[in-house]
Amino acid sequence: MRRRVTKAVFPVAGLGTRFLPATKSIPKEILTLVDRPLIQYAIDEARAAGITEFIFVTSRGKSALEDYFDHAPELEAKLRRSNKTELLEVLRGTNMESGAIAYLRQHQPLGLGHAVWCARRLIGAEPFAVILPDDVIAGDVPCLKQMVDAHSETGGNMVAAMEVPADKVSAYGVLDVAEDMGMLARVRGMVEKPKPEEAPSRLAVIGRYILTPSVLKNLGKKRAGAGGEIQLTDAIADDIAQGHDVFGFRFRGQRFDCGSKAGFLQATLAFGLARNDLHDDLIEFIEDVVAARRAAQ
Ligand code: G1P
């Protein structure tokens, strides 16, 4: 039987400069979609996929993340006293079991691959997931759960993938597909941030991975790639060259690039519209805005 995936790495060391000044004093992963910080969506998705050990790779100035997942005894006591049971439940959803969450520092910003490599000792010799909290994915079945289910059949490495417009490929890791099987694509190569004319396809890597420990070994070579950084994409591509399987997985769901302002606002709107308590007010507002725009044309 294949080993179950129980560990996930959350690379959260980035400075979040695109969201300055908000991120001057708070980590970008604490920025809020409706009423939950980005990181909560990532943790909930991991939990739904059966992850029980959460490894955060952080950097200076990220201590608000540690506090967020800590218990808040005074706040809980206050809510209990005033019988706010619903809020108490919401708050409890942010608590982590003792020992389930580990924080490591990436001391230098050497890239995503390096951040994942920093977690190597905690991962050990088993398959593990990587979640990039900037990529928020809405769907009936959470994306990582879809991948874990598919991975139990395929083994090997798996990356979430979706088609992007040709002029956007240079923002992504891009897959060179050997065999397209629909939801799954067997991959023969991967390129990080290619120029559009050099991209092997339009099938881009989205921030969910299930990886084998040999990728960590490849990362240990510390080869600098695109942008002078140690790239996760290159270490996965090396694994193909070493004879291991890599699959692109076309997930079902809508992905929001919450690393960009437009993507973040779209996600805010989409998640707000999905909420019964906010839906009608929001629709009314959107209709007014559209009507005013039409009238002005
Ligand atoms: C990272 C990865 C890239 C992937 C992307 C998905 O890039 O390096 O391969 O396609 O996430 O969001 P970044 O967005 O950190 O530049």
Image (tube, grey):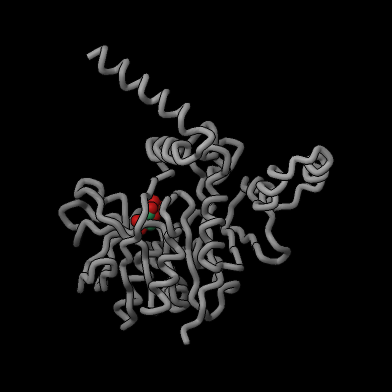
**How far from the left and from the top, in percent, is residue 211?**
43, 72
Instruction: Locate residue 281 relative to residue 163 in the image: left or right.
Output: right
The answer to whether residue 272 is seen in the rendering is yes
- Which image quarter holds the C terminus? top left
Q: Nearer the viewer, residue 271 or 203?
A: 271
Give the number of callouts. 0
Image position of 180 with respect to 279: above or below: below
Residue at 48% x, 76% y: name it.
127
Q: Nearer the viewer, residue 87 or 131?
A: 87
Residue at 81% x, 48% y: name it.
73
**How far from the left and from the top, in percent, is residue 253?**
37, 54
Image position of 286 with respect to 52: above or below: above
Instruction: Locate residue 75 relative to residue 95 in the image: left or right.
Output: right
Q: Which of 238 and 290 is in front in this view?
A: 290
Residue at 53% x, 51% y: name it.
41
**How far from the left and from the top, in percent, is residue 195?**
21, 52
**How far from the left and from the top, in percent, is residue 53?**
61, 67
**Ligand 1 quadrant in view:** bottom left
Image position of 246 with respect to 98: above or below: below
Residue at 35% x, 23% y: name it.
287
The answer to whether residue 18 is seen in the rendering is no
Furthest residue toward bottom? 1
Furthest residue toward top? 296
In the rendered image, which quarter is residue 158 located in?
bottom left
Instruction: Locate residue 17 relative to residue 93 in the image: left or right.
Output: left
